[in-house]
Amino acid sequence: MITSSPQAEEAERETMRLKIYADSLMRDLIVMEDTLTRAQAIHSSMKPDVLSPIPTMWTVGCTISAIAVPVRALVGVSIAGAIAGAVSLAAPTVWHSAQSKSLERNASKLRELKSAIENGADLTMYADYLSHKHFGTLKSIAAEIKASRERISDDSS
C-alpha cells in the first residue's frame, strides 16, 4: 500500500482542480468561438442599405435647396439637412464595417486565449480582454487557474 504525505495529496487535488478549471475554460472558449463564427457568417451575409431612397432624396433635395435658394437663413438649414442626409447614408456602411472588425478582433483574441491555455501560458496578460462584463466568469476561472498553478509550484518547491 502506498501512502503519501498531506502535501502531496493537496498538490494532487490542486492539479486536478486546475485541470477541471482549464477544461471548463477551454469548453467555454470553444462555445464562444463557435458563436462568434456563426455571428460572423450571419453578419457577412447581411449587407448594409447603401442607397436608401428616403435619405438619398433628402440629401439631394437639401443640397439642391442649399445651392438654388438665395435666402441666407434657408441655406444654413439646407446645408445642415444635406450633411445629416449624407451622414445617414454613410452610417450603415460605417457601422457594418465597425461590427465586422469587432467580430474579427474578438475571434482573434479567443484564438489567442485558447492557444495560451493549450500551451500553459500565464493568463494574466489577457486580463483586460477578460475584464469585459461578458467574460467575467472566464476571468474568475483564469484567476483560479493562475492561483492553483502558483500553489502547485510553491508546494513542489
Image: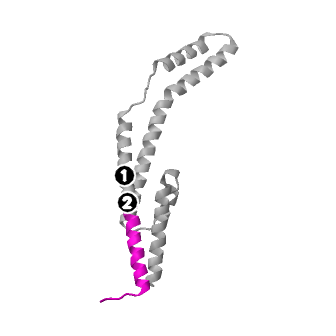
**Regarding mark 2 in the picture, which secondary structure is present there?**
helix
Q: Earlier in the sequence, mark 1 or mark 2?
A: 2
| Residue 32 is inside the magenta segment | no
- Checking the image for residue 12, the label placed there is none
Q: Which image quadrant is residue 24 in?
A: bottom left
Name which residue lies at 36% across and 67% down. Answer: 119
Q: Which residue is mark 1?
A: 31
Q: Going by the picture, which residue comes out furthest to the front?
A: 1
| Residue 11 is inside the magenta segment | yes
Q: Residues within 10 Å of mark 1 (few under 14, many from 20)?
A: few
Task: Residue 157 in the image: state x and y as whole percent.
Answer: 45, 85
Task: Residue 23 in the image: state x and y as whole percent.
Answer: 36, 63
Q: Which residue is mark 2?
A: 26
Q: Which residues are magenta?
A: 1-25
Name which residue lies at 35% across and 54% down. Answer: 30
Name which residue lies at 37% across and 69% down. Answer: 19
Q: Going by the picture, which residue comes out furthest to the right?
A: 73
Q: In the image, what residue type sits under mark 2?
A: Met
